C-alpha cells in the first residue's frame, strides 16, 4: 500500500535519483523525468497526486511546465524547486497555480517533511472536491418532520446512530424521504464537514459498476484513456449513500462486500491497494425479504450493509404530519411571502393518499405557490387527481364493522347450543342469522 503518486521533473540526474529514493523509502510512488516534455506527455496518461518541478530547465522552464501541467492534470498539487530562489519567482509561481516553493539543496528529512505537509494539503483538497458533489441545501432538524409515534422513533434512532460508523439500510417507497434521512444522519455525525456522495445504483450499467465505484487506470478497458478516481475514493473521510442498493448486480455485490470488510480496494487495471475511511448508508424501495429469498440480494452483502434498518412509512400512513409538512414547504419556497391555505384546500391535501409520497407532496406545494398570485391557496388550484380523489376511509370503516360482526357471530355460535339460541342472543331472527352465516361463509 502506498500514500500517493508523485511526479518529479528536474534536469539534474543526481537530484532525481536522490528524490526518487527518498520518496520510495517513505511509501510514495515516484515517477522521475529529466525531460519536461516527456513528463508532460506522461501527465496526460496518469493522475499524479503531487508534482515537484525544477524552475530552471531546458527546453521548457518550470513556470512553462507548471502552466501546461495545470491544463493536463488540474487535480495535481504542484511545488516548484529551485537553487535560485527569490521572492519574485516564488510569487510568480504561486500566482500561476503552484501550491508552494522550495529551495535546493535540502536534506532527506527536510524534503519528507515538505512532502508530508503538501500531501496533507492535497488530501484536504480532495475532500473539498468531494463536497462539491453535495447539494448546496443545508439541513436543519426542521427538514425531518417527526410528529406521529412511528416517525418520532425514526428520528430518535437516526440521532442515536448518527455519530457511529455502523452501516444503515433505509427502506421505504419512492419519495418517502430516504435521501433526506441519510443526509440528516450525515449532518449529525462527526463526518458532517466531509463529503456526502450519492451513488444511484440503478443508473449505472453493470459493466461500468466497478470503474464507477473504485476508479480505473489508463488502458484498463476500451475508452479508458486516462486514470479516473472512483466515487468511493472521492468520498474518503465522509459518507457514501448507496441509493437503490438492491439494484447492484450480484457480481458487484461480492466485490463491494470485500471492500466493506477492509475498506481496501484496487482501481480497475491496477495492482496497487488503496485504503479509505467512509461510512455507508444504503436505501432501497424494494421488498428486501423477497429479494433475499429469490437470491436477488446476497445474504452476506445484506448483513454487511444492514447494521441498522430503518423503515420509512408512506405519507398515507402519516397524514397527521401533512399540515406541518405543508407549512415547512410553503416557508421553504414562498421566499418571504405570507401565504394562506384555505380550509377546503387543506382538507383535500390531507385526504389524498399521495402515491408519490413526500416528493409528490413537495412538488404540489411548489405548483400551488405558482398559482397563488394573491398569496391564497385555493382548492381550485389543486391538480385534478387530488380534486377527484375519493377517500377510502368510509369503505374501510364498513369493512371493519363487517369483520367485527363476523367475529361476534362466530363467538356466539360457539357459546350457544343451537342457531336458534344464537339468534336469540344476537337479538335477530333465525332467517337473518342464516343470511349472515351464508354471507360470511359460516
Image: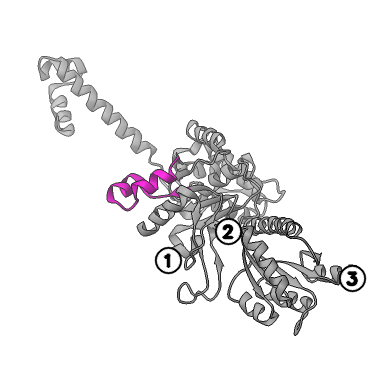
Q: Is residue 155 magenta?
A: no
Whichever of labels 2 and 1 marks the residue nearer the N terminus, that label is 2
Q: Residue furthest bottom?
A: 59
Vertical position of residue 210 compared to residue 353: above or below: below
Give the residue pinned by disc 2: 2
- Image spot of residue 120 (x, y percent): 69, 55
Quadrant for the N terminus, please: bottom right
Q: Residue 289's quadrant in the figure?
A: top left
* Classed neighbour count for the residue bearing mark 2: other residues with Cα under 10 Å, few (<14), some (14–19), many (≥20): few
Q: Which residue is mark 1?
A: 205
| Residue at 41% from the left image edge and 67% from the top image edge | 207
Label 3 close to label 2 by CB (< 8 Å)? no
Q: Which residue is mark 3?
A: 88
Location of residue 373 by image quarter: bottom right
User: Vertical placement of 226 versus 372: above or below?
Assistant: below
Q: Nearer the viewer, residue 333 or 421?
A: 333
Task: Please state the extent of the stretch shown in magenta in the rendering.
Answer: 282-307
Give the Cα distance between marks 3 and 1: 52 Å
Who comes first in sequence, dot 3 or dot 1?
3
Residue 366 or residue 52, whichever sits in front: 52
Residue at image position (53%, 51%) is 240
Real-space CA distance between mark 3 and mark 2, rounded to the nearest whole angstrom: 36 Å
Amino acid at each position: 500500500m502506498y500514500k500517493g503518486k508523485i511526479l518529479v521533473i528536474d534536469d539534474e540526474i543526481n537530484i532525481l535519483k536522490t528524490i526518487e529514493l527518498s520518496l520510495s523509502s517513505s511509501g510514495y510512488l515516484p515517477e522521475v523525468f529529466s525531460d519536461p516534455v516527456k513528463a508532460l506527455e506522461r501527465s496526460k496518461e496518469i493522475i499524479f497526486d503531487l508534482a515537484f518541478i525544477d524552475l530552471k530547465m531546458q527546453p521548457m522552464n518550470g513556470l512553462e511546465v507548471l502552466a501546461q501541467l495545470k491544463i493536463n492534470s488540474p487535480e495535481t498539487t504542484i511545488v516548484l524547486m529551485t537553487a535560485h530562489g527569490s521572492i519574485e519567482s516564488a510569487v510568480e509561481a504561486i500566482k500561476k497555480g503552484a501550491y508552494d516553493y522550495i529551495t535546493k539543496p535540502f536534506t532527506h528529512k527536510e524534503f519528507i517533511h515538505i512532502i508530508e505537509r503538501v500531501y496533507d494539503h492535497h488530501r484536504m483538497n480532495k475532500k473539498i472536491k468531494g463536497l462539491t458533489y453535495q447539494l448546496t441545501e443545508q439541513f436543519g432538524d426542521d427538514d425531518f418532520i417527526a410528529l406521529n409515534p412511528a416517525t418520532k422513533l425514526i428520528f430518535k434512532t437516526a440521532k442515536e446512530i448518527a455519530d457511529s460508523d455502523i452501516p444503515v439500510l433505509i427502506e421505504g417507497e419512492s419519495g418517502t424521504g430516504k435521501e433526506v434521512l441519510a443526509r440528516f444522519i450525515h449532518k449529525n455525525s462527526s463526518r458532517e464537514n466531509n463529503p456526502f456522495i450519492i451513488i444511484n445504483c440503478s443508473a449505472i450499467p453493470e459493466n461500468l459498476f466497478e470503474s464507477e465505484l473504485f476508479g480505473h487506470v489508463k488502458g484498463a478497458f476500451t475508452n479508458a484513456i486516462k486514470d479516473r478516481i472512483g466515487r468511493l475514493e472521492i468520498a474518503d473521510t465522509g459518507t457514501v449513500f448507496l441509493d437503490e442498493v438492491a439494484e447492484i448486480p450480484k457480481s458487484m455485490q461480492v466485490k463491494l462486500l470485500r471492500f466493506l470488510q477492509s475498506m481496501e480496494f484496487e482501481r480497475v487495471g491496477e495492482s496497487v491497494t488503496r485504503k479509505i475511511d467512509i461510512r455507508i448508508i444504503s436505501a432501497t424501495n424494494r421488498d428486501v425479504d423477497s429479494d433475499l429469498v429469490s437470491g436477488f440480494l446476497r445474504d452476506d452483502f445484506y448483513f454487511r450493509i444492514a447494521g441498522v434498518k430503518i423503515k420509512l412509512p408512506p405519507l398515507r400512513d402519516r397524514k397527521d404530519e401533512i399540515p406541518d409538512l405543508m407549512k415547512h414547504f410553503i416557508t421553504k419556497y414562498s421566499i418571504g411571502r405570507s401565504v394562506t391555505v384555505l380550509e377546503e384546500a387543506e382538507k383535500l391535501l390531507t385526504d389524498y393518499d399521495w402515491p408519490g409520497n413526500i416528493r409528490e407532496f413537495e412538488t404540489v406545494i411548489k405548483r400551488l405557490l405558482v398559482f397563488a398570485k394573491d398569496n391564497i391557496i385555493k382548492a381550485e388550484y389543486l391538480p385534478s387527481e387530488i380534486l377527484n380523489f375519493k377517500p377510502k376511509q368510509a369503505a374501510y370503516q364498513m369493512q371493519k364493522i363487517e369483520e367485527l360482526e363476523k367475529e361476534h357471530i362466530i363467538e356466539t355460535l360457539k357459546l350457544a347450543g343451537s342457531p336458534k339460541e344464537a339468534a336469540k342472543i344476537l337479538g335477530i331472527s333465525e332467517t337473518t342469522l342464516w343470511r349472515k352465516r351464508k354471507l360470511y361463509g359460516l
